[in-house]
Image (tube, rainbow, N blue to C red):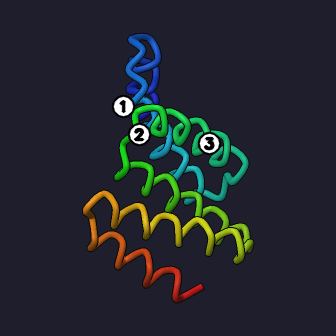
Amino acid sequence: MAAEAIVLNRAHGIFHHLGKHLMNLGNMYREAGKFDDAQVLLDEGAALIDRAGDQYWQAVAARYRGWLARDRGDWAQAGRWLALAARTYDLAGATADGDATREELARL
């Protein structure tokens, strides 16, 4: 399903939704242990979300990247990404997500 959405969004130039789909698929790859594939999709998706200027999804992108760094054992990088995610969630008005991310950061 996500792959079909990616194809449709690419074909129609809907970069905001494309960015979300790429990041969600990247996160699924992370969960499956396909870290290099996850990195490529997260980076591409995050660039598209930055282009759209969607603060909430910028926070999601940072959180997903933090999880990927954590799963790779790069604690310093994970901390930087999760701290950025928490701040960005707060700026987007999603304080509950920011608080949850700070809890994740504290468990690193």
Foreground pick, 12 / 99 = 99
Find out whether the residues at labels 2 and 1 contact each other: C-beta distance under 8 Å.
Answer: yes
- The amino acid type found where label 1 is placed reads His
Q: Residue at x 32, y 69 (%)?
A: 97
Q: Which label was assigned to residue 43?
A: 3
Q: Residues within 10 Å of mark 1 (few under 14, many from 20)?
A: some
- Pointer 1 residue: 17
Is 22 left, or right, of 95 in this rendering? right
Question: Looking at this view, is 13 or 21 the one in front?
Answer: 13
Vertical placement of residue 40 versus 85, above or below: above
Residue topped by disc 2:
20
In x, y percent, where is residue 73? 73, 74
Residue located at (35% from left, 79% from top)? 99
Image quarter in which the C terminus is found: bottom right
| Residue 36 position within the rendered picture, expressed as x and y whole percent measured from the top left | 73, 48
Between the C-alphas of marks 1 and 3, the distance is 15 Å
Query: Residue pushed farthest top?
Result: 11
Q: Report the front residue among 103 and 24.
A: 103
Q: Earlier in the sequence, mark 1 or mark 3?
A: 1
Q: Amino acid at mark 2?
A: Lys
Judge the density around disc 3: few (<14), some (14-19), many (≥20) Cα neighbours within 10 Å: some
Q: Residue at (40%, 33%) from the top-left corner? A: 52
Q: Which image quarter: residue 80?
A: bottom right
Residue type marked 3: Asp
Instruction: Determine whether 28 is above or below 94 in the image.
Output: above
Residue placed furthest toward the bottom: 107
Q: Looking at the image, which residue is at 41% across and 40% down? A: 20
Sequence-wise, the earlier of marks 2 and 3 is: 2
